[in-house]
Amino acid sequence: MSDEEETNEVENQEEEDVEPADCALTEELCGESLSLLCKIGNGLAHAYVRMDLRSKALTDISIISAFVHVRYLDLSDNKLSSLQPLSSLLHLLTLKADNNRLTSAALPQLPYLQRASFQNNKITSTEGISHPLLEVLNLNNNLITGVKFDTDALCKLSTLELRGNQLTTTAGLGLPKLQRLYLGENQITEIADLDKCTALKILHLRGNGSDTNQIESLDGFSKNMVALQYLNLRGTKVAALKPEIKKIKCLPMLRGLILKDSPVSKEEEYRIEVIMSIRNLERLDKDIFTEEERQEAQELYRQREEEGKLTDETSEGAMFLED
């Protein structure tokens, strides 16, 4: 590195370390950011209900509490460390606060909030998120190490994104109405509480092959997960093919499975062994099972049967062969 490059790097680091100068939201800026005129109350009055405050370098939004009719609010790409002034915005439907300096997403209950995004902050906890109509929640790329949700309050939550945090377990994620759960690039080694996710259709547990989601065991999956159709375990540390695959054969609706870049994907007869165990599977690593592969699985099953090499678990493959 040249002296000039080193000097520039030091200067950039110093800029990052400098506390942001206070930049408060003003009435003038609020007025410029408003749009979408809608009826309010009994329909005889009107107000602007969308406010776009992206990229304004804001550190203080106290004045926003007066804009009680706002329904769609974007505060992304600012320097905010608190969202408490939003507690009076009881008509909020969507909230975006990505790329700020938040350490918490906690807010008093917002009765109509349906979508909220807090990605790329410094949030460490999920406590204080209890909005009864919330359907979509994005907490990607924060510093969350453990999850604690009020499952009774979040009775509508269907999509939860927690990619790129510091979770080591799925404990605490047993949300009964959840349909899509994205947990890629955490540090997860244990699968727990997902048996409560009876509506879950899509589950991402992808690792990056090095230090994230080093899942070795597939303990924790349950026949209660009756809706799960897609499971992504790419880049995890699952190494024992037959013992681990039989742990997810209890998933009755599983149609797509990703194990690419994990140790099991390098085993001989990998695809054939998987389809023998999970007879309803349609895709493995995004490739559809061909008729030739299904025929090969059938022939291998019969060969093992003749040689007396079938275990009790393997013999269940007879159901697959009879289809």
Image (cartoon, rainbow, N blue to C red):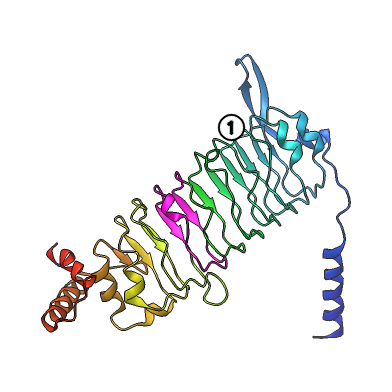
Q: Can you say which quadrant of the picture contains the N terminus?
A: bottom right
Name which residue lies at 58% across and 32% down: 112
Q: Amino acid at mark 1?
A: Tyr
Q: Is residue 241 left or right of residue 178?
A: left
* Secondary structure mostly taken by the magenta-highlighted segment of the chain: loop
Query: Is residue 191 shown in magenta?
Result: yes
Q: Can you say which quadrant of the picture contains the C terminus?
A: bottom left
Which region shows up in magenta? 176-204
Query: Is residue 256 shown in magenta?
Result: no
Q: Is residue 77 visible?
A: yes
Q: Residues within 10 Å of mark 1 (few under 14, many from 20)?
A: some
Q: Is residue 103 left or right of residue 260?
A: right
* Residue 302 rendering spot, x and y as whole percentages: 13, 77
Name which residue lies at 45% across and 70% down: 234
Q: Is residue 33 visible?
A: no
* Residue 139 rendering spot, x and y as whole percentages: 61, 53
Q: How many marks?
A: 1
According to the picture, the residue beneath numbered tag 1 turns out to be 112
In this view of the protein, which residue sits in the foreground, 311 or 320? 311
Q: Is residue 26 left or right of residue 288?
A: right
Name which residue lies at 63% across and 60% down: 145
Quadrant for residue 229, please give it.
bottom left
Is 7 rendered above or below residue 204? below
Name which residue lies at 48% across and 71% down: 215
* Residue 208 rendering spot, x and y as whole percentages: 53, 72
* Residue 72 rendering spot, x and y as whole percentages: 63, 36
